Image: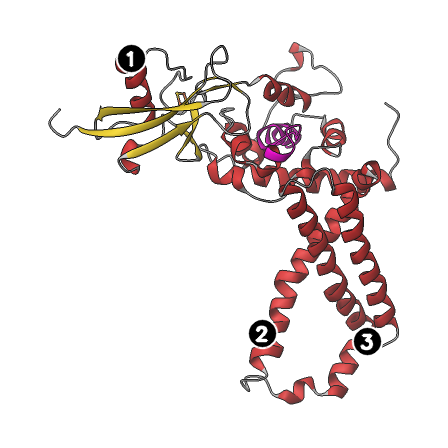
Amino acid sequence: MKDLLLRLEPVIWVLFGAGILVGTMLITGWILIVGLAVPTGLVSADALAFGRAYGLASHFVGRLVLLGLIALPMWKGAHHMRHLSIDHGGAERDAVVAPILYGIATIGSIAAIVAVARL
Amino acid sequence: MSDAKTMKLVITRFDPDVDAVPRTQEYEIPVQPDWKVLDAVNFIKDEVDGTLSHRWSCRMAVCGSCGMMVNGEPKLTCKVALSDYGDELLIEPLANFPVVRDLVVEMEGFMDKFKSVKPWIITAKEMAAEEGTNRQSPAELEVFKQFSMCINCMLCYSACPVVANEPEFLGPAAIALGHRYNMDSRDEGQAERNEIFRGEGTVFSCSYANECSEVCPKNVDPAAAVNQAKLNAVIDWATGLVIPRKGP
Ligand code: FES
């Protein structure tokens, strides 16, 4: 398991890095729009009317963006929690913790792919 | 001497021949306003207690030998002013290292880590003297210069939470050193070092705590080096998938 984790490290790190990018930039923007701009009337609620939002989300590019928004932060979270576990004396249990965390991210990503494909 | 005040220094003592575990000893000494922390430790060694062991040499933040934990933080003691602290100071040997005696730590394993990243310029073919010198532009130098400013003081190892848990972790300074050569325009050893960097206990063991860069007294920013090294190791790995490597 240790060897496998080591060999997968470059892939995991890329997913993690992408997750940071998406998590810090896109989701912040998303929260600003949905949580602040629309409720305060800065942006008209019509902009997020179902028809428009659905049109955007079901477009090919829209689906890809949605997939990234949902799946990548899970990898960021999994990787961060794995290192948190190691930093708190979990080097020994890493062979168990890492597969569980990355497993959750993998299942979540597959679920996201299915959900986005069925939109 | 009129503006002299006194200060209490609590120092870790350990004599492997006598002590089973480290103990502390308190010293009340007169201090001068312009003293560095090292001056106070030297004063104790010279005037109060000659049995105290500690390392130092240049007194100008160049040799990297005077690192100690000052109030729990790794510091170059010749660089930090005593006046930055209150009336009492706790001085311990650098954390995450085996203690040889008092404030002196064992550095042997650390030196092996340095050697393992091949910190020299690797070229495919030696250049004959007649061919002239290897040229490097200021812009090419700028790419790695910062990472070459390390004085091997080991403060970053002392601050790193990963080193604390996994003593075999290659660590900030050694990775920064390997990265420094990888970024050198005269070097051709990137593939070899990237292979090392993808091994166990190297760049991907870093947990992004950034403590190394916080404590670095020379602004080397080893955390940046580690993360650039990660990216390079990934790019090198991905390139290897597309373009198979030539045999060794
Ligand atoms: S004595 Fe040389 S760095 Fe402090």
Splitting the image into 4 quarters, where does residue B162 fall?
A: top right
**Residue stretch in magenta:** B164-184
Q: Secondary structure at mark 3?
A: loop
Residue pictured at 37% horizontal, 31% vertical: B90
Give whichever of B160, B220 is nearer the camera: B160
Q: Secondary structure at mark 1?
A: helix
Q: Nearer the viewer, mark 1 or mark 2?
A: 1
* Mark 1–mark 3 distance (CA, rounded to whole Å): 78 Å
Image coords of residue B66 (percent x, y)? 42, 22
Q: Is residue B191 left or right of residue B110?
A: right
Q: Is residue B101 visible?
A: yes
- The numbered dot on residue A32 is 2
Category of crowding for the residue at label 2, using alpha-carbon neighbours closer than 10 angstroms: few (below 14), some (14–19), many (at least 20) = few
**Residue under pointer 1:** B46
Q: Is residue B167 left or right of residue A72?
A: left
- The quarter in which the C terminus of chain B is drawn is top right
Q: Are marks 3 and 2 in contact (CB under 8 Å)?
A: no
**Chain containing mark 1:** B
Residue pictured at 61% horizontal, 31% vertical: B171
Category of crowding for the residue at label 3, using alpha-carbon neighbours closer than 10 angstroms: few (below 14), some (14–19), many (at least 20) = few
**Chain containing mark 2:** A
Q: Is residue A64 left or right of residue B26?
A: right
Q: Is mark 3 within 8 Å of ligand 1?
A: no
- The quarter in which the N terminus of chain B is drawn is top left
Callouts 3 and 2 in the same chain: yes
Residue pictured at 70% horizontal, 32% vertical: B201
**Chain containing mark 3:** A
Q: Nearer the viewer, mark 1 or mark 3?
A: 1
Q: Label 3 amino acid?
A: His
Image coords of residue B126 (percent x, y)? 71, 14
Q: Label 1 amino acid?
A: Asp
